[in-house]
Each structure stands twice: as C-alpha cells, then as structure tokens.
Image (tube, rainbow, N blue to C red):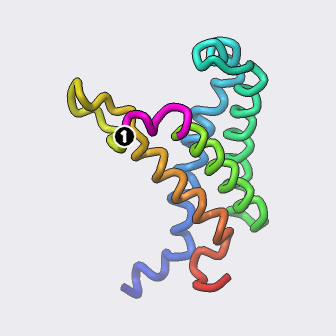
Amino acid sequence: MDTLNKFSGFGHWLPRLSLAITFLYHGFPKFAMAQGMADMMGMPVIAVYMLALMEVGGALLILWGGFGPDWATRIGGLLFAVVMMGAVGMVHAQYGWNSVNMGPDMPGKGMEFQVLIIAVSLLFAFKGNNLNEANS
C-alpha cells in the first residue's frame, strides 16, 4: 500500500481529466451546431450556446483548478452538476437507469452515466482541491 500511497497526490487527475475531456468533446461542437441542436431539442438557440459555454467553461475551470485555485475546481464541478441534472431531467430519466444498449427494450438512453458524472462533479464541488482531507 505504501507504493500506491506515493501516487495519491495525483489521483484527482483521473476523474478531473475524464470530466474535462468529456465536456470539451461534447461542448465545443455545440457552438458550431447550435441552431440544429436548438431545433432538435425544441429550445432557444441561446440556451444551446449557454450550455456549450457551461460545458467548455466548466472543463477549463476543472483543469485550471488542478493546478491551484480551489474555487475553480468547485465552480467547474457545480457547472457540470447543473448541466447533467438538466440532461437527466430533460432526456435520460424517462428511459430509466440503464445506459448500455442491451436490446430493443433497453435502448441505452438511461441516466446511469449522467448520475455518475453528477456524483463526481459534486465531489469536486463539495471538496474542491481537498479530496484527501476528511473535513475540509
């Protein structure tokens, strides 16, 4: 265990990078496809631009927070949690839990992946850069 403990200070980068890459991957294209996405989802185009800004901005904040400012990590986590709660409420909850396509009666549109993202995002929001401390 001592060997693994030597790397504990870097552990926060695994979920941090995963979240940032996921939101950059899904956020940047929204800027280019805003009108089409707005039409598809039945929402104003400005809402899609705001969503893209929250996703890309949250990703940049969560990455920046890894190098220093605790507030950047916390705000990034909050932005992600809000985005994903909206996704669950607007799209995924109606399909139940399963997000893996396992057949015609399980289309893989459930909220399992989104709830995991919410949980990790709220961990960053609640704990900031103090993930190793019990009461920070």
Please identify the quadrant where the N terminus is shown.
bottom left
Question: Which residue in the structure is indicated by mark 1?
Answer: 96
- Residue found 64% across the figure and 71% down from its top: 127
**Looking at the image, residue 13 lies above or below residue 109:** below
Q: Neighbour class for label 1 at 10 Å: few (<14), some, many (≥20)?
A: some
Residue at 47% from the left image edge and 50% from the top image edge: 115
Q: Position of residue 31 (x, y in %)?
A: 71, 23
The amino acid type, in three-letter code, at marker 1 is Gly
Q: Is residue 41 magenta?
A: no
Q: Is residue 104 left or right of residue 79?
A: left
Q: Residue at x 73, y 52 (%)?
A: 61
In percent of the image, x 45 and y 39: which residue is there? 93
Indicate the position of residue 77 as horizontal and vertical percent values.
Answer: 65, 56
Residue 76, percent from left and from top: 70, 53
**Quadrant position of residue 28:** top right
**Dividing the image into 4 quarters, which one contains the C terminus?**
bottom right
Q: Nearer the viewer, residue 51 or 33?
A: 51
Which portion, as a residue range, is magenta?
89-95
Name above or below for residue 112 compared with residue 38.
below
**What's the magenta bit mostly, secondary-structure-wise?**
helix
Label 1: which secondary element: loop
Which image quadrant for residue 35?
top right
Q: Quadrant of residue 66?
A: bottom right
Please identify the residue farthest to the left as the structure is shown: 103
Please provide percent x and percent y for residue 46.
78, 23
